[in-house]
Amino acid sequence: MHDITIRRAEQTDIPELSRLWLEKMTLQQQFDRRFLLAVEGRAAWERRLREWLADPACAVLVGAAGETLSGYIIGWVQDAPPGLVPARIGAVTDLALDAHRYQGGAGRALVKALRVWLSEQGIKHLIVYVPFRGAVEQAFWRSMGATEWVDVMWLT
């Protein structure tokens, strides 16, 4: 395995990032049909990603093994609910690894780099959006020390 280099994502990474995103979403659909990919879903995600790359409250980090992207993490600085301390928290809204290659340690390296960025923003606490039916994702975050905080309910 190549060493993983973590860096900020660039505009030129968008096609590969959206490939990884689409791969992850396609797999998640097998376990939870409440979210379906839109016909133009990939293009819409790419447009939004361009905005995120320019947003100072967002960090999109990639892990690269040589020329190949191993995965990415998207993190945000956001306000906590009013009246609570801390007033600002970090949030991980997405983490994806290339499912076709062994990525030993890539997920942990991405989380570590995001935590450094959040620390530079004065953020110590982090929430993570993890699919309820995502056993692998749940296990990963628990291995990182995450504990359950709130339940998000789905109502139709």
Image (spheres, rainbow, N blue to C red):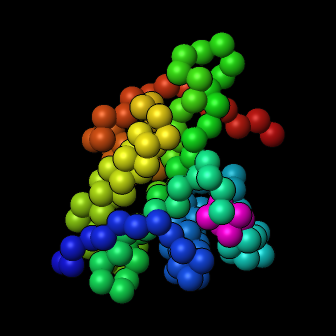
Q: Could you tell me what secondary structure mostly forms the magenta stretch?
A: helix
Closer to us: 98 or 122: 122
Report the residue at 37% width, 34% height from top: 146
Q: Residue furthest right?
A: 156
Q: Quadrant of the N terminus?
A: bottom left
**Left or right of residue 22: residue 1:** left
- Residue furthest bottom as drawn: 67
Up the image or down, 128 lies above or below 88; here it is below
Residue furthest to the top: 83
Taking 130 as reference, is 100 above or below it?
Answer: below
In the rendering, at what x and y percent does residue 130 appear?
50, 45
> Residue at coordinates 52% horizontally, 50% vertically from top-left?
75
Residue 88 showing in the rendered view? yes
Q: Is residue 116 magenta?
A: no
* Left or right of residue 145, residue 138 in this image: right
Tell me what residue is drawn at x 45 percent, y 31 percent: 125
Viewer-closest of 20 and 86:
86
Q: Position of residue 32 (x, y in %)?
A: 60, 54
Residue 129 visible in the current orientation: no
> Could you say where residue 152 lies in the image, as x and y percent from the top left?
63, 32
Is residue 126 rendered to the left or right of residue 40?
left
Residue 107 shown left or right of residue 58 in the figure? left
Q: Residue at x 33, y 38 (%)?
A: 142
Q: Which residues are magenta?
A: 48-53
